[in-house]
Amino acid sequence: MTDMISAETVTQVWQDMARASLDKVPHLINRMRTEQPVVLAYLLAVGDALFNQHERELIFYLGMVVWQMMKQSKRRLRKVTEERLEQAEEANYDFLERLSASLEADFESATEAMITTYPEPEVLRYIFEAIMEEEDYDPDDPPIREEYRGLAVVYLKTVLDVFISSLAAAPRSRRR
């Protein structure tokens, strides 16, 4: 498929978001409220009982970055429906159960295999790397606790899956 989001685009969007000033956040949230209200509500509600405040903020931020990445697609991103989101979440929980059911599953091999066959491999790779990153982290910005990383991936992959399923069938007619 030639209309996948490139590694360069993923890196550029991630860097742009990382450099964005805090005063841009309310504007982005308002745009998401208009363009993707179901996804915004989902990101605001994820893991309330399990994740600490920092982890919830990190998942929310990563979800916003994924949204910005998916907006770079050559195809138009339509509004996500609640039904579509629930279906994607259920499929991801099923996948996580299957993965954890296979005793001593090789998580790295499973994720690499998934990435190679995934419709948006570079965006999915970004999610895995952002969640699994442990080395050289800032003490003021710790990673997600190890026992909750799989769940964080499920939430973010659900967001990505639902965005992919919400892409219009035909490429955009206007040039970027």
Image (tube, helix red, strand yellow):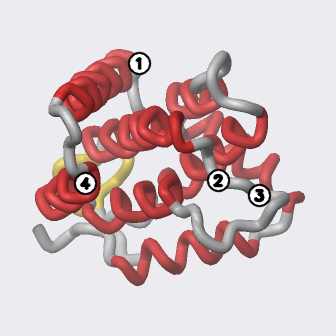
Q: Say if mark 1 contacts mark 3, CB within 8 Å.
A: no
- Tell me how far mark 3 sits from mark 2, CA to CA: 7 Å
Tell me the crowding category of disc 2: few under 14, some 14 to 19, or many 20 or more residues within 10 angstroms, Cα based: some
**Tag 1: amino acid:** Glu
Image coordinates for residue 136, horizontal then vertical, percent: 66, 73
Image coordinates for residue 176, horizontal then vertical, percent: 42, 77
Name the element at disc 3.
loop
The residue pinned by badge 2 equals 143
Q: Is residue 153 left or right of residue 172?
A: right
Query: Which circle marks residue 24 in the picture?
Result: none
**Tag 2: amino acid:** Pro
- Tell me how far mark 1 sits from mark 3, CA to CA: 32 Å
**Tag 4: amino acid:** Thr
- Of marks 1 and 3, the one in the foreground: 3
The residue pinned by badge 3 equals 141
Is residue 159 in view from this perspective?
no
Residue placed at 51% from the left, 32% from the top?
39
**Tag 3: amino acid:** Asp
Residue placed at 58% from the left, 52% from the top?
62
Name the element at disc 4.
helix
Residue placed at 28% from the left, 31% from the top?
96
Q: So how many labels did they put on this image?
A: 4
Residue 83's image quarter? top left
The residue pinned by badge 4 equals 111
- Tell me how far mark 3 sits from mark 4, CA to CA: 25 Å
Q: Residue furthest front?
A: 104
Tell me the crowding category of disc 4: few under 14, some 14 to 19, or many 20 or more residues within 10 angstroms, Cα based: few
- Tell me how far mark 2 sits from mark 4, CA to CA: 19 Å
